[in-house]
Amino acid sequence: MVKIAPSILSADFANLERDIRRISCADWLHVDVMDGCFVPNLTIGVPVVQSIRRCTGMFLDVHLMIDKPERYIPAFAQAGADLLSVHLEADHPSGIARALRLMEEHGVRKAVALRPITKAEAVLPYLEELDMVLVMTVEPGFGGQSFIEEQLDTVRRVRELIELRNPACRLEVDGGVSPKTAPLVLSAGADTLVAGSAVYGARDPAAVIKALRGQG
Ligand code: DX5
Ligand code: ZN
């Protein structure tokens, strides 16, 4: 089943609880953590995830856009994340492997994320143990960018690898997803859609969530 994960990056941070309630018909809540180093933007940290955890029972899908993410896995797990995504470009393979081990020890679901420059095959060393692969369809860092259509090839290739090695693994796409681009992403093999500006920029976020599911 397709899951929709609105990104609170496009929410009003002064009214976060209200904006989380506005998308309660979605499946997951996508939380973008940026460190000003891996990406040129600073956003949400551990205390905010902790506060979000207290105000919603939604599944928290936490996207870590930070260098050497293993340093922060225990803190985000304890703050209440249900799933953590670490970028393959954010550390050496040994650091990524340690980050995944820490997720396992802390009982959170495990995902790796790919910038547009990274080949689908980069997931292979980890794929068997993953709960999800996240393919970026914009350069990570900011909401509201245009969908990079060439990334559909990466989505297709990751889907093939998932079918071969770990069919239970989810495939999430993040960046420029809207009711217009969602059908392309879904037909390329994604089953989990992140959408920030398309959902929060709309007068009726629930209608957009429905449209993203293909029920518009
Ligand atoms: C970008 C973030 C995305 C962002 C998506 O670095 O990872 O999750 O919020 O925003 P839209 O849907 O506006 O492209
Ligand atoms: Zn994201």
Image (tube, rainbow, N blue to C red):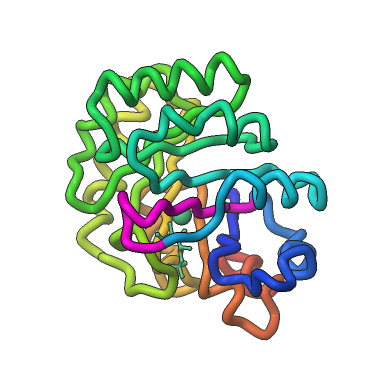
109 to 147, vertically: above or below: above
Q: Is the N terminus in the top left, top right, bottom left or bottom right quadrant?
A: top right
Frontmost residue, 114 versus 169: 114
Relative to 61, is 22 on the left or the right? right
Q: How many marks?
A: 0
Q: Residue 30 at x, y = what percent?
A: 57, 53
Q: Is residue 164 visible?
A: no
Residue displayed at 59% across by 26% down: 108
Q: Quadrant of residue 101?
A: top left
Residue displayed at 65% across by 67% down: 210
Magenta region: which residues? 29-41
Q: Is the C terminus in the top left, top right, bottom left or bottom right quadrant?
A: bottom right
Q: Quadrant of residue 199?
A: bottom right
As for residue 82 lying within the magenta part, the answer is no
As for residue 36 lying within the magenta part, the answer is yes
Give the farthest residue toward the bottom: 203
